Amino acid sequence: MTTPTAQIGPAPVVRMTGIQKHFGAVHANRSAEIEVAAGEIHALVGENGAGKSTLMKILSGMLPADGGRVEVGGRDVTGWSTTQAIVAGVGMVHQHFMLVPTLTVAENVVLGREPVNVGTFDRDRAIREVETLSKQSGLIVPAERLVADLSVGEAQRVEILKTLYRGARILLLDEPTAVLSPPEVTELWGVLRRVRDQGTTIILITHKLDEVMAVTERITVMRQGATVAQLATRETTPEGIARAMVGREVDLAIRDGQRVTREPGRTGTANGLIVSNLTVRGARVERAVNDVSFTVAPGEILGIAGVEGNGQTELLEAIAGLRRATSGRIQLGALDITAATVRERADAGLSHIPEDRHQRGLILDYSVADNLILGQQHRFTQRGVLDRHAIATNAAEQATRFDIRPANTTAKVRDLSGGNQQKVVIARELSRHFIVLLAAQPTRGVDVGAIEFIHDALRRARDAGKAILLVSAELREILTLSDRIAVMYGGRIVTVMPRSDASEAVLGPFMTGARKGSQADAA
Amino acid sequence: MRMTESRRAALEEALLPLAVALAVVLVVGDLLILAYGEAPGAVWRLLLDGTWGNAYGIGQVLYKATTLTCTGLAVALALRAGLFNIGAEGQLAAGGFGAAVMGLALPTGTPSLLAIGACVAAAALCGSAVGAVPGVLRARFGAHEVIVTIMMNFIVLALLNYVVAAKLHVPETLHTPALEAGTVGRVAATFPAFHGSALNWTIVLVAAAVVSVAWYLFRTRAGFELRAVGLQPDAAEYGGVSVSRTWIGAMALSGAIAGLGGVNFVLGYKGYYEDGFAGGAGFLGIVVALVGRNHPLGVVIAALFFATLSQGGLAINAMVPKQIVEVLQGIVILAIASSVPEVRRLVRKAAGARRADTGATS
């Protein structure tokens, strides 16, 4: 394979060559390589399952490589431990924060390297040191607040600060923007540039091309475990990167939302979803969903934008019957389903793509065929006995129609790639009889090719007259698919607008709570 | 090609605990026997001769395996629903008691089939009642079933002890009078070779139970939903399954199966209920289920294995103390609990290395 290579001037601070890594039958890295120059922001991009995280875990000492060579600062460090990596100044900020919620920010930052005064923890010095470092790096954090009380964006800053406190000179960030609102993302870029200017090298794992273009200097593209391109950001385009990631042309225009939307509310709500004054209790808060009302008409997609954790999960679970509503009413057309069981709702025409396919949407140790009937097992049963023939026929049909690979439907779903797992969920929920579809994070952790496919499937369902409620953390996705857009903040729907009025700039302030519209009831 | 490989992996996975148990028994057993100054080879030969070497031995092994299959199957079924039923001991005793009470209550001369049917139903019902309590407490109040089943053992065993000692016993003994009706015939009555062994026709009932449970788990919708709850309760709930109802049902069914084990002793062997007859067979059922990988067929094989050890202990008593077998059982439990995941990981690693050697094109 020819690898277009952008030349590096000085000796690279990180060089990984010929990296091999197997997980059982999965070949996660096959001759992967990356070269990062000192003091640059470097993007490591690729579809989900391309082996980006594996490569970075090998670099940070969390995983041993099966083969290949890792060099940091010109030194061969192949097979080092996390401790050695930290001492050498390699720090990783994980997608899931590793903070102790019951400790303060300062305590979290110094954890493992606490300043000590005659054998006891020197809290004052810890706070002083954290505040100094905070000022230097531009990572503004409240040193004495409990981590439990922080917003997601603040928690992430603490996470980065912690890594810097341990003396990181090479900072690895795994999909840092997945949990941030647009203004927080902009702020993060500012911080990263500043940290870079102070001499830190940054490797950014991402699959969002706009981020790559916005903030990085050079790009390493991975596909199916191998490095397929090394590019200079200045010399390439999003299309060029996407082509390298997927291995074929991708129509980014569709993903960018340049398309005609339908007129909303055209057909009334006779077969739509009607939610009135719904209040739902959350795990920690009394009113995770707070007096929410909206409707979704047949043939429209209502997108709910918002930073994760503002009640979207509870809202969808309440509609799906997985969480009890404290008060309010949920209707499928004229039918009140507020007190109905999950199965009754399904039989009444409610379909649901859950946000967490690993926990909710699939039984990972069941076969593809068995997963394709989950929730409809009573339709594939004769006098209490499973109709294996019907299950196999259904599976073969769906696997072909939705291009699920491998086509062997007796394989465990666990062994499928993330994109194909999600296709199993989509196939099941779209091929049954339904009038209303709840789609939560329908393309999370799914590769670019599958995203196109899933978006097309959702649009086709909409065009066939289904009412679709879409919840996504990806603002881009909301803007691409929705006919109307609502924003959830703090358990309330703070605004509802037609797609034509919406943009990232318009929605951003609502998502952070900076702007509050009236509780919009768009019936 | 891929199919056969995955099937072989599944088989390896299924047989691994049994292989570990066997290896542990052989190694530790050898050391213990040597410590007593006997030759391991001779002792093992004696053990095999006394179990699988003659019809009486085989009969005894099968008799013991019948009870162990019931308790093992009970534990396995609950585990398939994600619940750890430590209460098979109490459920077994309750089942035996239920069978005995029914047998005592029926008039002499009740048609045999009718009487047996009633007694078996009573056994299943009593075991089921004892099993359902932890299921209900778990489903309604979130009380952990491990704690509750352990407590239920104490309660049930003490209660039965009281009832038998105070109301139902034959003076000077801890057992009830002989049953009027409902006893199950010995196999030896038809096949005299088994003469003297406790093997009785309950084994047929239990074999049917094994087949039924396998069919239930893997062929019916209820089984599909039960296994779904055991693997991922959140996904099962999403799929329209009532998790709490499934838990209650699974525990009731588990208790009923354990209760069937009581039939083997009460109706098939003694013809009366005797306090303490369970004798740890309920607890051993946990190990049987684990070694049998919660699969009905695996449970049968594991039950035969432990029944062989148990009966073999009596055979080798002439050379070494039979308590050696109890020590071995304990060590097998520890080995299964601690080492099997370890061994599995090692096997996987070796398999991974092998695959890498043969090229990554597979």
Image (cartoon, rainbow, N blue to C red):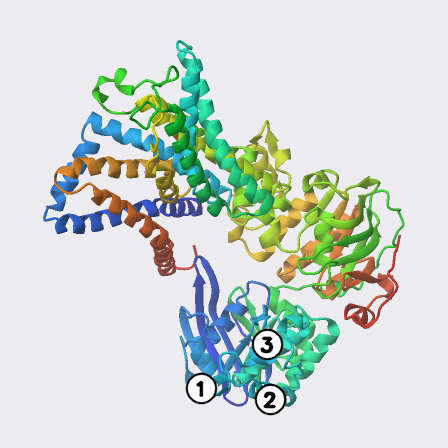
| Mark 1 lies on residue | A74
**Residues under labels 1 and 2: Cα distance?**
35 Å
- Indicate the amino acid at tag 2: Arg
Task: State which chain disc 3 sits on.
Answer: A
Which badge, 3 or 1, is on the more N-terminal residue? 1
Q: Quadrant of residue A105?
A: bottom right
Q: Residue A128: which disc?
A: 2
Does residue B83 appear in the picture of this structure?
yes
**How many residues crowd around disc 1 within 10 Å: few (fewer than 14), some, or many (20 or more)?**
few
Q: Secondary structure at mark 3?
A: helix
**Residues under labels 2 and 3: Cα distance?**
18 Å
Q: Residue A159: which disc?
A: 3
Asked whether the residues under the numbered discs 3 and 1 touch, taking CB atoms below 8 Å apart as contact, a structural biologist would say no
On screen, residue A56 versus residue A319, left or right, reads left
On screen, residue B195 versus residue A280, left or right, reads left
Q: Please state which of residues A73 and B165 is positioned toward the viewer in this rendering.
A: B165
Q: Secondary structure at mark 2?
A: helix
Which badge, 1 or 2, is on the more N-terminal residue? 1
On screen, residue A294 versus residue A64, left or right, reads right
**How many residues crowd around disc 2 within 10 Å: few (fewer than 14), some, or many (20 or more)?**
few
Task: State which chain disc 1 sits on.
Answer: A
- Indicate the amino acid at tag 3: Glu
Q: Nearer the viewer, mark 1 or mark 2?
A: 2
Vertical relation: A380 (above or below) A423: above
